Image (cartoon, coloured by chain):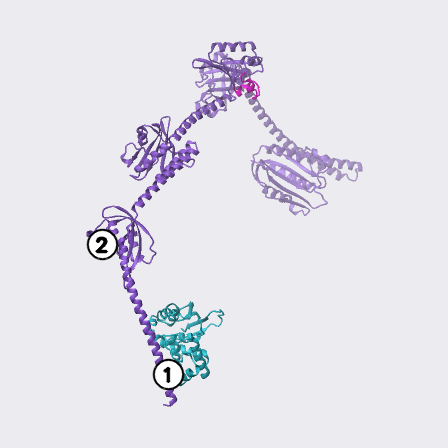
Amino acid sequence: MKGFIFTEFIRFVEESHGLAIVDEMIESSNLPSRGVYSAFNSYPFDELATMLTFICNKTKDSAEFLLEEFGKFVFPYLIGKHSYIIKEYKNPLDLIAGIESHIHIEVKKLYEDAELPEFRLVEKQDNKLVMIYDSKRGLTYFAIGLMKQTLTHFEVNGKVWIDSKYKENTGVKLIVEINE
Amino acid sequence: MSNSSVDILKRALERERKAKLIAEDFVEKRLRELYLENVSLTQNLSTQEEFQKYLIDNLVDALFVVDFKGNILKVNKEAKLLLGVDDDNLPNNINEFSVVNRDRINKYFSRSNYKENHSEFQFQFYNRKKEHKVVRIKSRILINTKNKPYAYQAIVRDVTENYELDLKIKEQLEVKKFEALILKDLLTSNDIFNNAWTLVNHIANFLKTDDCVFYGLVNNKLIQLAATGNKISSDKTILNKLKIPITDGVIGQVARSKKGIIVKDTTLHDSYIVDVESRLSEIAVPILLDEELIGVIDSEHIEKNYYKTSHLEFLSNISSLIAFQIKNSVNQLEKRLKQDELEKTRKRLEIIFNSDHNAEVIESNDGYIIDIGDGFLKMFGMPLSMKNKLLGMRCSKAREQLKNLFIDEDNYSKNISDRISNLRPVLNETLELKDGRFLARDYVPIFFKGRIESHVWRFRDITLSVNYEKSIEAQNRKYKGLIGNMNLGLMEIDSDNTILTVNKAFCAMYGYESKELLGHKADDTLLNTQHNLCKSKSEDDIKISNNDVNELEIITKNGDIRYWLVNRNSNKNINNNVIGSICIYLDITELKQLNIKNEGLIKNLTASNEELSHYAHLVSHDLKTPLRTISTCVYWLQEDNNDILSAESNDFITTINDTLKDMDKLITSTLQFAEIRMANSSIDENIDLNAVLETYRKNKFLDSDDEFTFTIEKPLPTIVFNRVQIQQVFQNLVDNSYKYKDEQKQSYVKINWEDQEEFLLFKISDNGIGIAKEHSSFVFEIFKKVGNRTDSTGVGLWIIKKIINSAGGKIWFDSKLGVGTTFYFTIKKQ
């Protein structure tokens, strides 16, 4: 897992719960990296899971909630860094639809070792987008957070939710809908 | 800041520093990698460029770089060779060259085309040295540093030689294929027509034209044996079966010179013969076998300058291939035509020979039967199957058998040997058979090359015509006798009224001998006729008045005046032209005199009848007066002496009275009868029967009688009749119904009528007492009456019958005793 997730997660915990909690989280978690993260490198996913669990226990918030909040938190960082990618998009649905076909390709140019989830586009209308999110890791809510923040970024009202009727083994069906 | 806070920050700072080191390491490592990659790529690239340059220069194919506007940016050595240029005069643009189908080339090199799949592409052009080149191009797009396509790099291979070789091979292949096709057809079939048609179709296909004609030399004329295109109708008969004398036209020219020619423009060629439609170029080659002309193959094309020398070679080649076969076929055709002709003649002769009309026998010069017609067998009653037995038989033997059929047996045989020894045709000899038939016989000797070859005996049955002539003669005699002996006078005259024939009766009527009349004009005054004998009229009148009978007053030879009726009919010849007339005369002088006598008699009779009627009227009227006096006197006598007269005397007086009454009635009837007779002479008039019966009904007060109904079932017609008489008829009949009504029932009388074609039928029916069968026979007799009724005179029905009958009608009745009576009578319609 790319290092920026870890550096941003630590920043996220620091901003939401303070540096003391960050310190406590790293000191008590016995991480192989000892909490030293560089955005260039990759680190085991387990370390993120360990830190997330710690925060859940500490704050009594659900992992899903935390991940979604984390997603929203990361969005400005991502677009700030990679504005040359984002500026091509004029609306949130095009951007989300372009994750797989465009954004991930740009990511791969920088980090060829990046392990990226799949976003398979099922349906795209002017105000609605249906896709299958398929990842080795359970970061669905992280993705939802990112998408919700995308809507906010484009100053659009809308919803993102999981289609509970979707029962396939691989992936989760995500629906993004914009209010008229 | 607390210690713990400081610790936390220290730790966080420591983590950040470490992370920074890690990141620096990563970046340094990555930079180094990139540097190395770059160095190796640059080296690689220069080697590649050099290699490419080398490759291009040594390429066996031409290489062009052409931009989208067709500008030539770069060429190699080979390309210069291909274009026929050197370094001094390098072309700028591909459009400087003459290219077959330029649009295709321009499209190929256009900008819009670069995304399309650039496959191999072949085209032809003419280079600077005017050489025809066929090239094959493979190209790829070139991209500039800005990643934009800007030109095509095209590898161009010169395939001119291959192309021409290919064409030649194709052409030869085509020729061989076609030759094989023709040979196959010729070998598999000997039928000239099939051959010829196959041939022309193949040739036309090969020459890519719709017109090819094959002429065969038959009887020194070129005859179209087969043709393609619009000369062939569906049944393969040539529409315009052109026969060309060997001297005429392009084909004639070929036939004479025995050399194939191409006519590039037929409009410039004076010997061109227009066939179905005019075409502008023509090719023709002779079919020769050992320098002998067998036929001509000819093809035309609508375009000028169509045929090439290669076509001529090809056709010549074909013609030599097929010559032998065609010769054979032409020979066969000629033979077949002759055979057909012979066969047709034979068939015709056979039909004629075997027709029933011709009974013929052909005898060979040495006396055998060569042929026998079916008609002959039939004539002599032999079955047709006998024919085979008779053929080859000696004629003398056959004659022996036939001879006894003829009346003149001996002459028959002798006659024949005379004929044969004379060898002269003898026609129409009449022979009589024992069975009553007559035959006409013709004898014709047949010579072949000056020598007697055979004898033909032909028989015809002329019985009918012989008998016909005989019967005509007999008839003629019969009618002449009839005419001569009949009582009517008959005279035949020609159209100039000259007398041709007269019969005995005419002479007797007229008093002249026939020789005094024949040759004279019928209207000649010499004949003492007050009127002309034939009432000379114009021809038109005669036609119209045919069958008219006219009366003539004639003065006979001894001066008597006679009255004749004449009927004149025009006499026509076979062609229906009038050649004269036949007049038939009847002497009616006696009849006429009788008539005149009769007329006088009738006049007298009528007069005396009228007198009689008048007299009867007078008498009956006058008789009534004394009768009344007697009646009155007897009445007074009885009144005055009633008490002294014995019963017997009284009875006598009663008898006298009854008798007087009877007598009175008799006189009344007689009076009535006389009146009717007198009324007879009065005139018929239009009478409305409804009015007549209405008056009668009122006078009789029939309406006031409850026990008797009088009905007219439908309105009666108006008739033309004597008024008194018709009144009497209806009155009498209705009176009778009333008189003889049946007191036991409600009585009626009904009057009805029907319109029958020529008559009006009237019905007067009642339900009276009816007429007994035994009385029915004398109902209409005068003075007959049933019973002793004092109100009936017995004259009424008799009078009615007289009236109806004399007006041409009938009266009768149906009756059943106790049921009723219906009287019917008819009146002739006017």
Q: In the image, which is nearer the foreground, mark 2 or mark 1?
A: 1
Image quadrant for the C terminus of chain B?
A: top right
- Magenta stretch bounds: B372-392
Query: For chain B, what colour was chosen?
Result: purple
Whole-percent x, y for residue A97 in the image: 39, 69
Query: Residue furthest toward the left?
Result: B88
| Residue B86, position as x, y percentages in the image | 21, 51
Q: On what subunit does the disc labeled 2 rest?
A: B
Whether residue B132 is visible: yes
Name the kind of residue labelled 2 in the image.
Asn
Magenta stretch encompasses residue B374 = yes
Residue B646 visible in the displayed image: no
Q: Secondary structure at mark 1?
A: helix
Q: Colour of chain A?
A: cyan
Q: Residue furthest bottom?
A: B2
Q: Position of residue B255 (x, y in %)?
A: 32, 29
Judging from the image, what secondary structure is the residue with disc 2 in?
Answer: loop
**Residue B276, image quadrant:** top left
Pointer 2 residue: B92
The answer for which chain carries disc 1 is: B
For mark 1, what is the residue? B12
Q: Residues within 10 Å of mark 2 (few under 14, many from 20)?
A: few
Residue A40: image location, x then y, percent: 36, 74
Identified by mark 1, the residue type is Ala
Labelled disc at residue B71:
none
Relative side of B783 to B77, left or right: right
